[in-house]
Image (cartoon, rainbow, N blue to C red):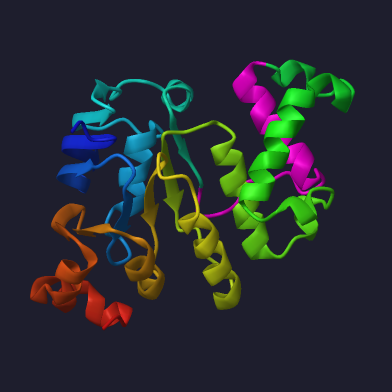
Amino acid sequence: MTPALQTEGLVRRFGGFVATSDVSLAVAPGARHALIGPNGAGKTTLVNLLTGFLEPSAGRVLLHGEDVTRLPQHRRVKRGLARTFQINRLFAEFTVLESVTLAVCERLGLGGRFWRPVGAQAQAVDEAAALLARLRLLDAAHTRTGELAYGRQRLVEIALALAAAPRVLLLDEPAAGVPRGESRELFETLAALPAEVTVVLIEHDMDLVFRYADRISVLVGGALLAEGAPAEIAADPQVRAVYLGQAGHG
């Protein structure tokens, strides 16, 4: 089976500093795959390489078997790769429905016509409303994003990413800054995403990771230390020594 997302010998140097060191991983279609590791392990750098925000010093990135290593970010999005960021990037004055409708319009090539009367964009509005229903946000459709609780703002950001109709969704610390009660709701919503959407996430809350992920890759010092099912990672003595002990899992 062709991986949904794959790297081969991926390296990123910043001068003499190696931030990503010969990382080769394969994410299966439909997987819930977590990237974990201590601060400075290179997780966000790896996501930036996967999405085209950074170019690798060596190695390749493949999306459903296609080499996308040199493609810019927007062309990777067109091929089905979307991401969120550690800090949300929402327009606080837009309502939730307006924000997601705009994202849908961009995908449909209607971005320049977004400000026409809503009735002229019925298809985009209907799709946006369906996304909000899927993410349990329909009750907030007409609320400005800046007025939402932070956990729900993160869900809006995920809705914006899903509006691009991705086949692979990268989530960079989706629960960062979110109160524990809200983070559980957030991950319950993520767990209900369609199986055809492959999810790769960076997350520091190990309880959430071990509950949500079906496969885990551990990065340390920019290199891949271990990879396996959650039970294998939890039992790995090397992983426990360098990360899980300090992260407080198990």
Image location of residue 218, percent across then percent down: 21, 60
Image location of residue 78, percent across then percent down: 47, 22
Write the residue at 25% across / 28% down. 62
User: Where's the N terminus, which quadrant?
Assistant: top left
Of the pair 42 and 217, the residue shown nearer to us: 217
Write the residue at 39% across / 62% down. 203
**106 falls in the magenta region:** yes
Image location of residue 109, percent across then percent down: 64, 16
Write the residue at 61% across / 40% down. 160
Q: Is residue 130 left or right of residue 186?
A: right
Of the pair 21 and 162, the residue shown nearer to us: 162
User: Where's the C terminus, which quadrant?
Assistant: bottom left
Image location of residue 193, percent across then percent down: 49, 49
Q: Which segment did they paint magenta?
A: 85-109
| Residue farthest along the right direction in this orientation | 117
Q: Is residue 126 left or right of residue 115?
A: left
Residue 55 lies in what quarter of the image? top left
Q: Is residue 127 left or right of residue 25?
A: right
Placement of 59 over or under 246, stated as above or below: above
